[in-house]
Amino acid sequence: MKTNLFAILLFVVCAVTTQTLSQRVWAQSTATSMGMTADQATAVKAIKIANLDKDTYFKSGGFILDRYEERPAYVFTYSDGITRKIYLYKVFTAQDTKELGLLAIYKNEKSGDVKSFVIPGASADRKAWDAYIDDLKYVGEKEPGLMSTLTFVLSREMAGLLAGGSGKSEEGGDKKKDEYNFCFAADAPVTLANGSSKPISTLQAGDVIQGYATATKTVLPTRVTKLTVHEAGSFTIAGVWLTPAAELTAGTQAQPTAPVLFEATANHPVLTATGRKALGEVATGELLYRTENGRAEAYRVVRTEAAVRTVDRVYSLATEAGAYVVGGTVVLDK
């Protein structure tokens, strides 16, 4: 009897907490269109994530999944010795980056079981909410430890929102669109495996280009697995000017090399001496890497510019290596 009462209490707390969290999160959105439909909730729930710890941002089936507030997984280890994890993703439509809700994923590290819960936004269709409540009742209660971990995570996030500690506000659809499109202009030169280059807009899946293995720090051929195109709106291209780091250090040349310009959207990740970083976060003095004669050489940023130009269409690649070369500079898959 006590067990049943406790399960009912967890169910009620989880449902109420979720509703409050969704109202707090989606009250910050300026979108006026309808929220998540039941069909969208079903489609999001069916999305399979290959690596929950590494796949923090990706597009699948017409949706964008983005790790909630860039949080790592919540990890729980109970007295039974089983490690349980909860991962939270924000869900957006890929077409217009409209925020739809949250995807909470529970994983039992011992059994490997993974269970997904689609949490609709406050303006979602009633049937989408009904599906979520059914999942809590008929799926959540069958897995020991699931309801308590999920309730804790949602309550923790709600407390953060109430305290003003998270839930970043947005400034309209254009900002949202820029935030989730990690790309290059159509004329951005991608280095091929043979050392020549082609505009990124002319590439396609299956092409072999120059890649980079971050683990071994070696240049190697890699295959394009996907070309993504965004063409709805105006996209700001940022830039950094680079000079060979060795030249600046040694100071042996009477005539220094003219800085070279590298361009991308401000959010596109590049490889720096301290690891992965969005281009717009790179500061003067930091080191990026350019490939020369089959090797990656360090180049120092001597100038940054938030807006070099604007374009109406941008492109990005997915590669087998996870890193490739644009404009001679090593960049990372988004």
Image (cartoon, helix red, strand yellow):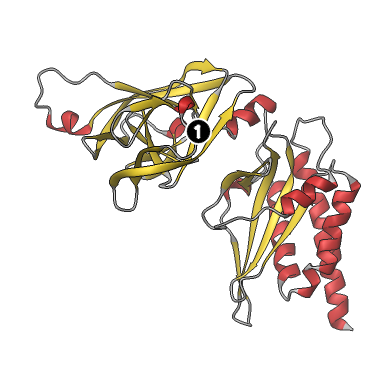
- Left or right of residue 38: residue 90: left
Residue at image position (20%, 21%) is 257
Front residue of 189 and 117: 189
- Left or right of residue 179: residue 5: right
Q: Quadrant of the N terminus?
A: bottom right
**Circle 1 residue:** 316
Residue at image position (61%, 77%) is 82
Q: Residue 323: which quarter of the image?
A: top left
Q: Residue 147: which quarter of the image?
A: bottom right
Q: Residue 51: which quarter of the image?
A: bottom right
Instruction: Report x, y in % for residue 58.
Output: 58, 44
Is any atom of residue 173 visible in this view?
A: yes
Instruction: Report x, y in % for residue 127.
Output: 89, 50
Front residue of 243 and 302: 243
- Left or right of residue 244: residue 101: right
Front residue of 137 and 204: 204
Height in image: 98 above or below 188?
below
Judging from the image, what secondary structure is the residue with disc 1 in? strand
Residue at image position (43%, 45%) is 322
Instruction: Report x, y in % for residue 26.
Output: 77, 40
- Left or right of residue 144: residue 256: left
